[in-house]
Image (tube, grey):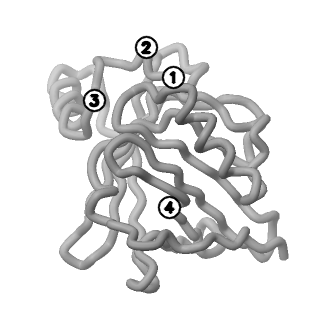
Amino acid sequence: MEHCPLVKPIRSFQLDKMMGFWFIVEYYSSSEMTSEYKCMQGELKITDAKEIIMNFTYSYVYDLDDELLSGNITWRIPNYHDPSHWIHTEEVYEGVYNTYVIDSDYDNWALIMHCAEKKKSSRYLSAFMLSRTEFLGHNVKAFLREKLPQYNIDLDYMFEVRHDECKSGITSMKEYYEYVLKNKASGEIDDA
């Protein structure tokens, strides 16, 4: 079995400052060789049960209908002495997904990595560069990219996520849910 890279805990990590709205501006997935997504954004929240929830939206680059899709993921913190490490478990996905905050300045950018060790298939590895705005400066991107190769992230497959042609100019999950409700009422979106 291929193991996940070792990630050092962030000293004095402030989980509450990671919460809120983020744009995903670059991503890597060990299962993808071409850019698949655009308009990817999410909102992190902490529940009363101390779980971390991310509600997210995205579109596929090659979707002619430009459909806005949504999803969510829930993590728990296995060790409160290291709140920068979160885990997510689903039997369907064959194992435990470890999520690590590699670095963040909380106000502008963050870098996170997911890794799952699987018994029946190859290890799954992904990384996401997050920004509080739609765009992140080239110098910041270069600084964050330099951190990734030590975690077996192949920078040749770290793809940009464009936000310049996103449906309805949505910039928060609240706006997304208002968009969905409005379009369901008008019949443009079906209840699936």
For marks 4 and 3, give the CA distance: 23 Å
**Residue visible at 67% across and 29% down?**
35
For marks 1 and 3, give the CA distance: 14 Å
For marks 1 and 4, give the CA distance: 22 Å
Name the foreground residue: 14 vs 44: 14
Identify residue for label 2: 165
Q: Secondary structure at mark 1?
A: loop
Are discs 4 and 3 less than 8 Å apart at CB? no
Mark 1 surroundings within 10 Å by alpha-carbon count, few (fewer than 14), some (14 through 19), many (20 or more)? some
Nearer to us: label 2 or label 4: 4
Identify residue for label 1: 162
Residue type highlighted by circle 2:
Glu
Q: Which mark is residue 171?
A: 3
Position in image of residue 99 (x %, y %): 54, 65
Mark 4 surroundings within 10 Å by alpha-carbon count, few (fewer than 14), some (14 through 19), many (20 or more)? many
**Residue visible at 41% across and 78% down?**
77
Name the foreground residue: 68 vs 48: 48
Q: Quadrant of the C terminus?
A: top left
Are discs 2 and 1 less than 8 Å apart at CB? yes
